[in-house]
Image (tube, rainbow, N blue to C red):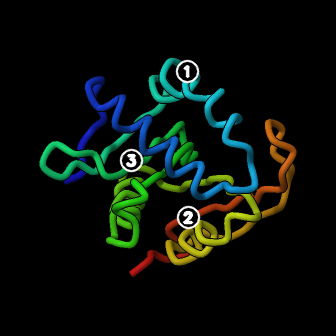
Amino acid sequence: MIRNFQEPDMDQVLKIWFEASIMAHDFIEKEFWEAKVTDMREVYLPSAETYVYDEEGMIKGFISLYEDTIAAIFVSPTAQGKGIGKQLMEKAKGVRQSLNLTVYKKNSKSIDFYKKCAFKTQREQIDEHTGHPELLMTFTPQQGRST
């Protein structure tokens, strides 16, 4: 079930974010993600509108929205490929008129997922934090819904 994030979810959400970030971004040093844990806990998650996929008390994934931006969408590495990401994305589409996100250009698995969710690439840019190329992608209802 998808529900609103609650403070007691914090440790499970951070664990998913950290493990999935390292797995999806093997081109970025693990230390970069380790250095961001406190910011995630104290700044990013508290300022975002976050929904979690909860399966019998275990968080399997989450999506964080900041205004019309998908600031984070992560599924536990052990739960990937089971439709959780798609359900989280549909939740986001249900609460926003349009969405945008950035994704590292080397993260082809995520780019493919976003394309299946009807996101379109707008431009390439450089991530100021890592120096790696990333894509800005957008979704608007007229672009079509994923099926």
In the picture, the quarter occupied by the N terminus is bottom left
Residue 90 visible at all:
no
Q: Dot 2 lies on which element?
A: loop
- Above or below for 74 versus 128: below
Q: Earlier in the sequence, mark 1 or mark 2?
A: 1
Query: Gap between marks 3 and 2, in whole Å?
Result: 21 Å
Query: Gap between marks 3 and 1, in whole Å?
Result: 18 Å
- In the rendered image, residue 44, in percent from the top left (x then y), is placed at 54, 28
Q: Dot 1 lies on which element?
A: helix
**The residue under label 2 is which amino acid type?**
Thr
Which label number is shown at residue 53?
A: none
Residue on which disc 1 sits: 38
Q: Dot 3 lies on which element?
A: strand
Residue on which disc 2 sits: 140
**The residue under label 3 is which amino acid type?**
Phe
Query: Gap between marks 1 and 2, in whole Å?
Result: 33 Å
Task: Choose top left, top right, bottom left or bottom right for residue 113.
Answer: bottom right
Residue at the bottom extreme? 147
- In the rendered image, residue 90, in percent from the top left (x then y), is placed at 37, 62
Residue 120 visible at all:
yes
- Above or below for 131 versus 143: above
**Disc 1 vs disc 2: which is toward the camera?**
1
Which label number is shown at residue 62?
A: 3
